[in-house]
Image (cartoon, helix red, strand yellow):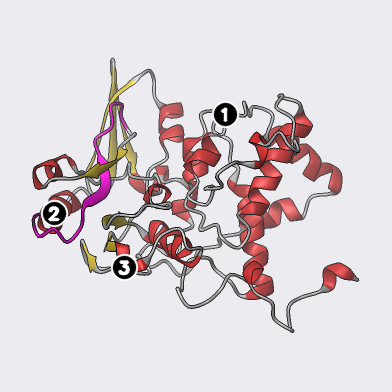
Amino acid sequence: MRAYTEKIREIARRLLEACTVERVLGFRRGSVPMMNAPCFVKTPAEAANLVWDSNCGINLANYLTSRSEKIGIFAKGCDSRNIVTHIIENKIRREQLVIIGVPCHGMIDRHRIAAMADGEIREVVEDENNIIVQGDGFKKVHNRHDVLQANCAVCTHRNPVIYDELVADLVEEPGDVDRYRDVREIEALSAEGKWDFFDDLLHDCIRCYACRNACPLCYCPTCFVDESRPQWVGKSQDPVDVRTFHFLRAYHCAGRCTDCGACERACPVGINMRVFTKKLEKDCLEKFGWEAGLSLEARPPLDAYRPDDPDDFIR
């Protein structure tokens, strides 16, 4: 995907020189390895700062909420699906956007790579098939496919669903992926087993809200965890408060989550909170035939009433 960089810079320069957009949203090189940073480019000269590689996992749709200017945005498959959701939910207008689609081969898991390193990582470079990690006194080469983010390994929408132009040719979508195997394994546990699983999963949560802040769906002016009149959830590290935060946030994302992995990528302690949203994603698919962000025409299942909606829950 490194070959995308020059094309991305060329497109950004062209859009800004022609005043087609007021600014372009993309990525610049981060200050530490595997942490490229979102950035707004406002002049043609600044387009030279844009990059694209396997460390662009942050969902750029998170930076579109309630903006008023004309924006060019580089969008992976999951980014574009969240852009669709933003448009449907009236957080941005389609005519404000020039969407440059970026067919995606998946982003690498910085937590997993760091855990396998023999010290502090100083540099990470990549070629078509490998990720080369270097630090003080060590060098490791990983097959790129083996260190993908978990959501990328099961992604079936790698191509953008809406776009005005493309950075490269569309990639082949995988057709033999079992997206919900981990969810079914949890569903098969006993009630006690499920309790133990989630108790262990959330044990290390420090309530930093990085997952919420990284999520493109969490744009409420005041989050329920910050409300004081009434106070919906405590501010402490009490396990009940921790569980309440994660479960309620997941339900707020029901029928809207695209499994972009931004929450898990942002978590400083490596919690896989995607298991919450993936369960709800699976239920929406099985009960309503719904996948979030694929169409500007269809309303989400929790946003519309149908006479044939499932009603087993009331029996």
Q: Which residue is mark 2?
A: 16
Q: Quadrant of residue 14?
A: bottom left
Q: Which residue is mark 3?
A: 95
Horizontal side, residue 1 vs residue 172: left or right: left
Mark 3 or mark 1: whose residue is earlier in sequence: 3
Helix or strand or loop: what does disc 3 sit on? Answer: helix
Q: Residue at x 60, y 43 (%)?
A: 273
Look at the image and say whether residue 18 sits in the magenta stretch: yes
* Cα–Cα gap, marks 2 and 3: 17 Å
Q: Which mark is nearer the camera, 3 or 1?
A: 3
Q: Reading the chain from its start, which is encountered first: label 2 or label 3?
A: 2
In the image, the segment drawn in magenta is: 16-33
Residue 308 in the image, given as x and y percentages of width and height:
74, 83
Q: Which mark is residue 208?
A: 1
The residue type indicated by label 2 comes to: Leu
Circle 3 crowding by C-alpha within 10 Å: few under 14, some 14–19, many from 20: few
Q: Residue at x 41, y 28 (%)?
A: 114
The quarter holding residue 41 reads: top left
> Which of pointers 1 and 2 indicates the residue nearer the eye?
2
Q: CA distance from mark 1 to mark 2?
A: 37 Å
Q: Is residue 62 above or below residue 49?
A: below
Query: CA–CA distance between discs 3 and 1?
Result: 35 Å
Residue 189, position as x, y percentages in the image: 79, 50
